[in-house]
Image (tube, grey):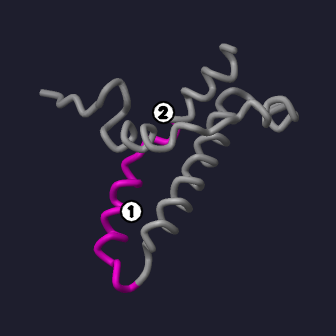
Amino acid sequence: MMIDTTYNGWTNYETWLTNLHFENFEFSDYKEDGTFEGMTKEQITDWIADYIETAVEEITYSRFEVGQSENLFLTDVVNCFLREVDWHDIAEQYIDDLYDA
């Protein structure tokens, strides 16, 4: 028996929650300035996924002082949570927005 781990149409709860809190990225300027020129849709998705992952980690780690010795438990919890996020699932919604507009 296979257990369904999707959540509200997303890969999992972690992906859904991350997208809920970090849903205001804008990539149309990158498209307009030629950043994605010559890239396949898959390469653009990878680029956007990496961008979002880096931004979310930087924001999260700086706000909660993740990595500080007094916050080792919090560091482990945040790292475990973010490791489960499907960054490509989030990126694909931006790809849809870029190419459906």
Q: Is residue 82 magenta?
A: yes
Tell me: 54 left or right of 7. right
Tell me: 55 left or right of 87. right
Tell me: 67 left or right of 59. left
Which residue is found at the position 55% from the left and 27% from the top? Answer: 93
Q: Secondary structure at mark 1?
A: helix
Tell me the amino acid under the disc marked 2.
Answer: Asp
Q: Which residue is mark 1?
A: 79
Q: Is residue 8 magenta?
A: no
Q: Residue furthest top?
A: 100
Tell me the amino acid under the disc marked 1.
Answer: Asn
Q: Which mark is residue 89?
A: 2
Q: Is residue 65 above or below residue 81?
A: below
Query: Residue 79 in the image: x percent, y percent?
Result: 39, 62
Mark 2 is surrounded, within 10 Å at the Cα level, by few (under 14), some (14 to 19) or many (20 or more) other residues, namely some
Q: Earlier in the sequence, mark 2 or mark 1?
A: 1
**Magenta part of the protein: which range?**
69-88
Query: Residue 23 in the image: x percent, y percent?
Result: 52, 37
Tell me the quarter of the picture where residue 72 sits. bottom left
> Which quadrant of the figure contains the N terminus?
top left
| Mark 2 vs mark 1, CA separation in Å | 19 Å
Q: Is residue 12 above or below residue 95?
A: below
